[in-house]
Amino acid sequence: MKVTVEITRRPEIADPQGTTIQRALHDLGNNEVMSVRVDRVIHLEVDGDDPAVVQSRVEEMCRQVLANPVLEDFSVEVTG
């Protein structure tokens, strides 16, 4: 099954990479950009027939290694 994991930094956590990109955009004259946040998307191919089981397993993988639970939130989407 194909799985997409979106990992986002929590809103209250600073995003230095986003700040750097915003500054660079402003330096290039793109002053209409008000803010930038950089998130991650991970695409997995997971063996399994039951979408609920695959979803549960990938959520556990996120808690264990893919996402930092102190700084980040995640969402998991399972598709055929």
Image (cartoon, helix red, strand yellow):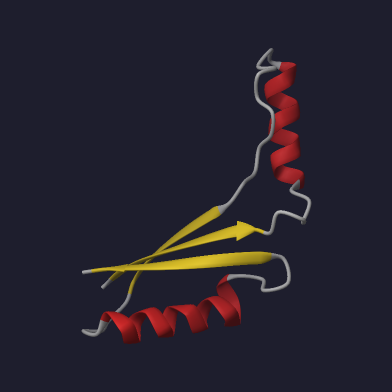
Give the residue drawn at x 69%, y 41%.
18
Give the residue drawn at x 41%, y 84%.
56
Task: Count every numbered label the image shows and give the total.
Answer: 0
Name the image quarter holding the N terminus: bottom left
The quarter holding residue 16 reads top right
**Above/below status of 70 relative to 47:** above
The quarter holding residue 47 reads bottom left
| Image x and y of residue 51, in percent | 28, 79
Name the image quarter holding the C terminus: bottom left
**Above/below status of 80 relative to 39:** below
| Image x and y of residue 37, in percent | 65, 44
| Image x and y of residue 13, in percent | 77, 56
Residue furthest to the top in view is 29
Q: Nearer the viewer, residue 45 or 69?
A: 69
Q: Nearer the viewer, residue 12 or 7?
A: 12
The quarter holding residue 68 reads bottom right
35 to the left or right of 67: right
| Image x and y of residue 79, in percent | 26, 67
57 to the left or right of 35: left
